[in-house]
């Protein structure tokens, strides 16, 4: 995302046989998609208007059990709304390492237009291309180096059944 790309050709080198005459085809990740973007999952949220309190499903079950309440009892563990109730919703349960607003600002500042995309594809989630190319220098020949002017990717809310 917003990083340079290269078009390369494989070549005979010291490591060619060990690599089965193949070579690198991408920089590779330095962190998982979840580490980069965080995790969205079911969680229990306080239903009071504008209350930001939430707990994980497991924490809610534990609190309800400790309080001796059954699954069908109205129960809340929100400290600010003891008469309220909790509702199950999908939401962020873990923050990611990537500040995607900062990534957007950096790309825009560099004159690169970003359409779609999400934190899990941010540049910091990947190895630096030049380091990877240097590590494989013996088995590749760089034919062209491409500098992006725009990036178009599926946005974060697109369901991808083939996502790795
Ligand atoms: Zn609340």
Image (spheres, rainbow, N blue to C red):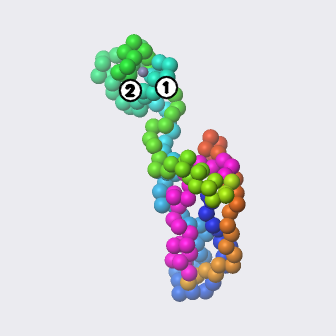
Membership of 134 in magenta stretch: yes
Query: Which residue corresponds to the image point at 67% horizontal and 52% vertical from the top-left?
Result: 114
Query: From which residue to which does the magenta span run?
Result: 114-137
Location of residue 149 with respect to 99 vertically, above or below? below
Which residue is nearer to you in this view: 6 or 13?
A: 6
In the image, ligand 1 is in what quadrant?
top left
Query: Which residue corresponds to the image point at 56% horizontal and 84% vertical from the top-left?
Result: 138
Mark 1 secondary-structure assignment: strand
Tag of residue 60: 2
Q: How crowded is mark 1: few (under 14 residues within 10 Å), some or many (20 or more)?
A: some
Location of residue 110 with respect to 156 vertically, above or below? below
Q: In which quarter of the image is residue 110?
A: bottom right
Does residue 138 appear to the left or right of 51 in the view shown?
right
Location of residue 114 with respect to 22 vertically, above or below? above
Location of residue 103 with respect to 84 vertically, above or below? below
The residue beneath circle 1 is: 88
Which residue is nearer to you in this view: 49 or 40?
A: 49
């Amino acid at each position: 995302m917003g990083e340079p790309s290269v078009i390369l050709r494989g070549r005979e080198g010291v490591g060619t046989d060990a690599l089965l005459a193949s070579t690198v085809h991408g920089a590779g990740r330095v962190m998982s998609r979840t580490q980069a973007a965080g995790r969205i999952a079911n969680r229990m949220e306080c239903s009071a208007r504008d209350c930001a309190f939430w707990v994980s499903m497991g924490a809610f079950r534990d609190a309800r059990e400790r309080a001796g309440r059954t699954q069908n009892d109205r129960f809340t563990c929100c400290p600010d709304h003891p008469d309220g109730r909790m509702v199950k919703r999908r939401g962020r349960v873990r923050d990611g390492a990537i500040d995607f607003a900062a990534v957007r600002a950096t790309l825009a500042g560099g004159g690169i237009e970003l359409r779609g995309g999400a934190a899990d594809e941010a540049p910091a989630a990947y190895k630096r291309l030049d380091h990877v190319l240097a590590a494989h220098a013996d088995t590749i020949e760089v034919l062209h180096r491409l500098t992006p002017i725009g990036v178009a990717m599926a946005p974060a809310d697109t369901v991808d059944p083939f996502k790795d």
